[in-house]
Amino acid sequence: MYQKLLIANRGEIAVRVIRACRELGIRSVAVYSEADRESLHVRLADEAQPIGPAPAAQSYLNVPAILQAAARSRVEAIHPGYGFLSENAHFAAVCKTWGLDFVGPEPDTIERMGSKTAARQRMQQAGVPIIPGTPGPCGLEEALAAAEQIGYPVLVKAAAGGGGRGIRVARSAEELTKVFTAAGREASASFANAELYLERYLEAPRHVEFQVLADRHGNVLHLFERDSSIQRRRQKVLEEAPSPLLTPELRAQMAAAAVEAARAVHYVGAGTIEFLVDARGRFYFIEMNTRIQVEHPATEWITGFDLVKEQIRIAAGEPVSITQADLAIRGWSVECRINAENPDERFTPTPGTVTRWRPPSGPWVRVDEGTYSGDTITPYYDSLLCKVVTWGRDRPEAVARMARALAEFEVEGIHTTIGMHRRLMAHPDFLAGDYHTSWLEQVFMGQA
């Protein structure tokens, strides 16, 4: 096992990795920008290294600065968290060149699965269902021809996309011509890659993802699913595990497909296979996230298994410490993402000073946080403040516990999305488990 590990990230995920390191007896090294000098992850780590000015491009995305910090600290491994460099194949490769273990999959795996079109082709070869669409990146003329064959509506997607960017819906040839240019422009600005592809647009699907773990000894297993269908602008807002949609039979089919998908790319580490499920119960692969995800605590609650510690063990060469037979779904979990945003002003980010921070506690409530009273929320990074995660013996208990936890949460000095989540917990559609990927914007947002 490692003696010292550097976390190339910030905020709540850096805090989460620091805590895992402490339990494993590993010294943790935080990195920080000038804006994060007083951040919680810097305070909690055993050591901290500066990596540059506030803008992410000059700090958390600055590969030379992070590698120099690793060299100064004499670490043996780097954990990338999520976001920033976590799915950057070049960074993973350079870590190897510097003699550092990258807590994640091999660089070629990241590269293959980072391209949505390449990932679709690989999954199709492996027999994993994919949404009908173009076999690879296409131009407008090819897209128009494919749309006639597939049938409208269609979805234009960035080949190197993520976070809901570079995606447009078209319901006619005229609309496709218009949105194709806009999607390409956004993809180029967001990912420095303007390539687009086309696939059938599924009306009101569910977004269900399976957590997988794999090691260098040939072991691949799944830790069941999370339902991430409550989204705004194609970005997740709330997750629950398991999914209220799945029957035991459908769960078994999707789990087998997820394991096969991980095997097909010789995956190593913790990853997530994401599917869309249509109204008829047919599921389709959409992408693989080659990192730990924001919503991993929900899976940890229902399995009793520490995913971050297992990530680190696997990176150090150890086999997965459990078998598939050891795993079972125990109870239910709900996870709410709390952001520094004002829902009444189109979710505008609200940087500022947190004058009061009193998170909830009590039985079966977990708060993964990256802030504290007196902390300054800057405009430079993602607005996620923390995640509130509850567990219950069944879904009604987990939801009721979340409602109680959110009622206890006190934050002053900035706007947050806590109020929106409180309303969510009382909405009859959510209480019935009856929602889809467009539900939040189509139904809830109109009533909130």
Image: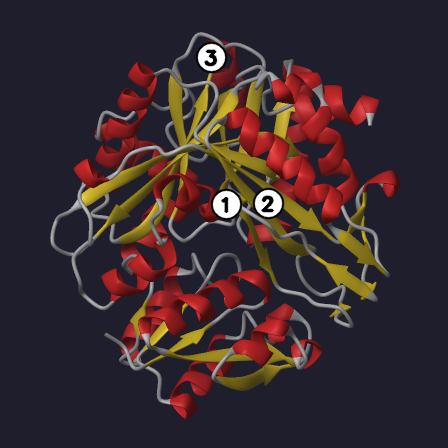
* Mark 2 and mark 3: Cα distance apart in space: 23 Å
Instruction: Tell me whether the residue at label 2 lies in contact with that at label 3, contact meaning CB atoms closer than 8 angstroms.
Output: no
Q: Quadrant of residue 51?
A: bottom right
Residue 343 in the image, given as x and y percentages of width and height: 82, 41
Mark nearer the N terminus (2 vs 3): 3
Residue type for callout 2: Ala
Which of the numbered marks, if any, corresponds to residue 187?
2
How crowded is the residue under tag 1: few (<14 C-alpha within 10 Å), some, or many (20+)? many
In the rendered image, the quadrant that contains the N terminus is bottom left
Which of the numbered marks, if any, corresponds to residue 295?
1
How crowded is the residue under tag 2: few (<14 C-alpha within 10 Å), some, or many (20+)? many
Residue type for callout 3: Ile
Residue 356 in the image, given as x and y percentages of width and height: 81, 63
Which of the numbered marks, if any, corresponds to residue 150?
3
Residue type for callout 1: Glu
Question: Helix, strand, or loop for circle 1?
Answer: loop
Which of the numbered marks, if any, corresponds to residue 315?
none
Mark nearer the N terminus (3 vs 1): 3
Answer left or right for 296 relative to 35.
left
Question: Helix, strand, or loop for circle 2?
Answer: helix
* Mark 2 and mark 1: Cα distance apart in space: 25 Å
Q: Residue at x 27, y 22 (%)?
A: 252
Q: Is residue 36 above or below residue 425?
A: below
Q: In this view, does 76 lie above or below 104?
A: below
User: Looking at the image, what colour scheme do you see?
Assistant: secondary structure
* Mark 3 and mark 1: Cα distance apart in space: 33 Å
Instruction: Tell me whether the residue at label 2 lies in contact with that at label 1, contact meaning CB atoms closer than 8 angstroms.
Output: no
Count how many numbered circles sit on residues in the image: 3
